[in-house]
Amino acid sequence: MLKDLIISIQAYFQAHAFISKHKLWRWIIIPGIIYACVFVIGMYFFGQTANHFMEWLKSLIQDSLTKINSSFLSFLITIGSFMIWIMMMLFYFSLFKYFFLIVGSPVFAYLSEKTESIIEGKSFTFSLPQLLKDILRGIKLSLRNSLWQTVYYIFLFLVSSLPVIGWFLFLLTLLIECYYYGFSMLDYSMERHKKSAAESIYFIGNHKGLAIGNGMIFYLMHLVPVIGWIFAPAYAVIAATLSLQPMKEQQEFDKL
């Protein structure tokens, strides 16, 4: 897993050089600007909703805190409330991410196929039936992953308010987020190699480091305002395609 994790992280640096060399910026910047604008607007409105919910929750327990008058308990409740707020924001980001994956499927599928055609030195010929097939596959898996992730989130959300235990589960939530996003990016290549959804799930499940590493850098890029938001989605799909090349060269796809 560590080896796959390193490969997926290195792939982002390779993706930057690849994009510059082959002048793919127009496929990066335009969708990226749209993504960044929708991301900011959505985060603002959902943030307001989360704040109102937290104020309502605090008002419910305010009387109990006054009667108990325990600074340590108040500290734990404050931390727990903060963790709930973070979990709510992550849940929104997860839903937004899948929404954009579905809407942006045509661009992501194109970029993945374009990247591989350049690597293999093949002339890229546009195929509408194949593109539509890739888009439909991406939408189906995005819906599947969002469903499973929502199930995990409901459990983690309920536990996140617990002292200490909830704090560690927050890290587990981040890993799940990274895995499922990276999974979606990697699957574009799996579908292009005629692998079924079950085969894709099996292969990526055995190479979790590729998915986690891809999703991890995607999320870290969001720490860089504007620039990171613009570049993150397209860099992720190109990096995912590049990270699978060693496996393809070793004919691991043929073993499925």
Image: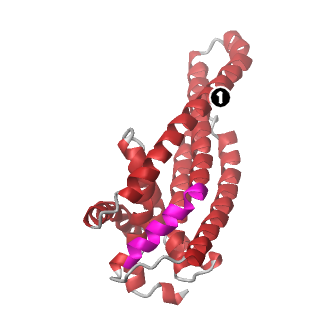
- The amino acid marked with disc number 1 is Thr
Residue 209, compared with residue 89, is above or below; it is below
Residue name at image x 46 percent, y 52 percent? 31
Residue 164 seen in the figure: no
Q: Position of residue 73 (x, y in %)?
A: 61, 21
Residue 37 picture location, percent across and down:
49, 40
Side of 3 where 46 appears, left or right: right
Q: Going 68% across and 51% down the picture, which residue do you hit? A: 150
Quadrant the N terminus occupies: bottom left
The answer to which of 226 and 110 lies nearer the viewer is: 110
In the image, residue 212 lies in the stretch drawn in magenta: no
Give the extent of the magenta segment. 101-117
Compared to 87, does 194 lie above or below? below
Q: Is residue 249 left or right of residue 184?
A: left
Say above or below: 172 vs 138: above
Q: Main secondary structure of the magenta part?
A: helix
Q: Is residue 115 visible?
A: yes
Residue 60 as seen in the image, left or right of residue 247: right
In this rendering, would 1 be left or right of 100?
left
Let me know if residue 103 is in the magenta part.
yes
Q: Quadrant of residue 243?
A: bottom left
Residue under circle 1?
49
**Viewer-proximal residue, 23 or 3?**
23
**How many numbered discs sit on the rendered protein?**
1
At mark 1, the secondary structure is: helix
Specify few, some or many for label 1: CA neighbours under 10 Å numbering under 14, 14-19, or 20 or more: few
Q: Residue at x 34, y 62 (%)?
A: 24
- Residue 187: image location, x then y, percent: 54, 70
Residue at 60% from the left image edge and 77% from the top image edge? 129
For the rendered model, the colour scheme is secondary structure
Q: Quadrant of the C terminus?
A: bottom right
